[in-house]
Amino acid sequence: MSMNPFNPEYENELDLLVQESEGHELVLFNDDVNTFDWVISSLVEVCDHEVLQAEQCALIVHTKGKCGVKNGTYEELEPKCTALLSRGLSAEIA
């Protein structure tokens, strides 16, 4: 295959490389049940966030409805997602 950047096949290869390199994202969603303190302590304990980072994520979740809290492979994120769900938080891997 030629490496001509104007070749549509080349664009498809670039799209695939970008998708593979990005991995997955653990997304936390807002709810009306959990307190800020619970969300913050959960992010610190489960996602290894620093307290300030966890506070910022909790505020984003509250104001925007959701926030990507961790990036990685599906295998890395699945146990973290399960742990957040078991704490009563709403999360998914995207």
Image (cartoon, grey):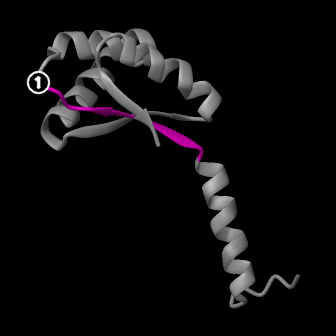
Q: Residue at x 68, y 75 (%)?
A: 12
Place of residue 75 in the rendered image (x, y in percent of width and height, measured from the top left)? 64, 28
Q: Is residue 94 above or below residue 20?
A: above
Q: Quadrant of residue 52?
A: top left
Q: Quadrant of residue 61?
A: top left
Q: Give left or right: position of 60 versus 20.
A: left
Please identify the residue farthest to the right as the structure is shown: 1
Q: Is residue 14 magenta?
A: no
Place of residue 44 in the rendered image (x, y in percent of width and height, measured from the top left)? 37, 13
Q: Residue at x 20, y 31 (%)?
A: 30
Q: Residue at x 59, y 44 (%)?
A: 23
Per the rendered image, the range of residues in magenta is 23-32
Q: Is residue 56 above or below residue 50?
A: below
Q: Main secondary structure of the magenta part?
A: strand
Q: Residue at x 17, y 27 (%)?
A: 31
Q: Is residue 48 visible?
A: no
Q: Give left or right: position of 35 versus 41.
A: left
Place of residue 77 in the rendered image (x, y in percent of width and height, measured from the top left)? 54, 27
Q: Is residue 6 visible?
A: yes
For label 1, the SS is loop
The residue identified by callout 1 is 32
The total of numbered circles placed on residues is 1
Residue type at mark 1 is Asp
Q: Is residue 50 above or below residue 1?
A: above
Q: Quadrant of the N terminus?
A: bottom right
Q: Give left or right: position of 83 versus 31.
A: right
